[in-house]
Amino acid sequence: MRLLKRPRRLRGNETIRSMIRETSINIDDLIYPMFVVPGENIKEEISSMPGIYRFSIDNLLKEVKEINELKIPAILLFGIPSKKDELGSEAYDENGIIQQAIKSIKNAIPEMLIITDVCMCEYTSHGHCGIVKDGYVQNDETTSYIAKIALSHVIAGADIVAPSDMMDGRVKAIRDVLDENGYVNTPIISYSAKYASSFYGPFREAAESAPQFGDRKSYQMDPANSDEALREISLDIEEGADIIMIKPALPYLDIIRRAKDTFNIPIAAYNVSGEYSMIKAASQMGYIDEKSAVLESLTGIKRAGADIIITYFAKDVAKWLTIL
Ligand code: PBG
């Protein structure tokens, strides 16, 4: 058979394959999420997320040193407070768990880029991401708290703040308060298209942040919507977001691609806890090969258009890419 076009010609060996490869994962693009708890000498594994731990600050510092040695440029910090209340008041306490963790990391490993998740659900007794009145999460009241929380993180030394609450207008509220306090150069990564997803399940165990009543569907997005994601993203860009985020990643690759094609702004994708746990569980059962499944998933997220990936696999990937 005489065939003019044979795409297999360019797949014959690894040299030619790597020469025409369109997408690659770089350690520089990875952000590693971490959980910090009060206390000393704590390193508790999260049962639904094998290999991921809650650390007290002393052990967190050891871990961040290792992350720095692996050349992972940034961490995303989540705090779990000693006590929760209706207003989530430890979230903006200058001596709160997250503020202490930020100061300690900046002191010990100043080159590590610290991004903080700005939200209330880990800090509120009801587990919702804002102020609840009559069973409804109040929007405008919540944004003033979100701004206060973000400012407290930046005062403690956070390099970037990442609001994940999904209230309307929170990016503007944060930008205003940071600018008023002289932090004009602190970027905001906005969780712009954050879906009400069942893939956050393991995270809620890790952060003890499951809502005590109802669900998050009155503020997080409906998984069925795509045009709405573009509206959310354009609002956040207008309000001053520097980087926008889509979350989760794998079930929403189409949203990442649409965002990439529509907006000229860096895009982050959050490869969330449930996406991590699925691969972990399947590989522990021997159903799939962990390393190739992880690299394929992250390649897919980049190919879809993400510039930055937040992933619990960041340490593994850094090791794999360095050994290769
Ligand atoms: C806080 C927050 C959540 C996640 C990141 N920030 C949980 C939620 O919204 O319920 C999920 C991250 C993950 O699943 O890895 N609002």
Image: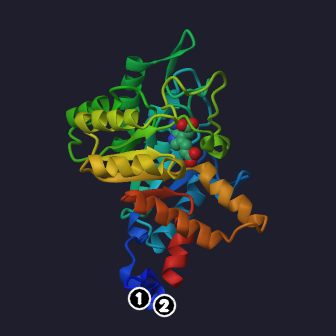
Q: Is residue 155 above or below residue 284?
A: above
- Residue lying at 52% horizontally and 45% vertically, measured from the top left: 78
Give the quadrant of ligand 1: top right
Residue 142 visible in the picture? yes
Nearer the observer, 155 or 287: 287
Pointer 2 and pointer 1: residues touching (CB < 8 Å)? yes
Q: Residues within 10 Å of mark 2 (few under 14, many from 20)?
A: few
Residue 24 screen position, x and y as percent: 41, 72
Nearer the observer, 123 or 229: 229
Residue 315 visible in the picture? no
Which residue in the structure is indicated by mark 1? 16
Q: Is residue 133 above or below residue 313?
A: above
Residue 238 screen position, x and y as percent: 23, 35
Name the side, left or right, on which 263 lies relative to 110.
left
- Residue lying at 42% horizontally and 83% vertically, measured from the top left: 6
Residue 84 screen position, x and y as percent: 60, 28
Residue 13's disc is 2
- Answer yes or no: disc 2 within 8 Å of ligand 1: no
- Answer yes or no: disc 1 within 8 Å of ligand 1: no
Q: Is residue 5 above or below residue 97?
A: below
User: In 3D space, how far apart are the residues under numbered discs 2 and 1 (Cα atoms)?
Assistant: 6 Å
- Residue lying at 67% horizontally and 54% vertically, measured from the top left: 277
Kind of residue at disc 1 = Ile
Answer with the quarter of the image where residue 284 lies. bottom right
Residue 154 screen position, x and y as percent: 34, 43
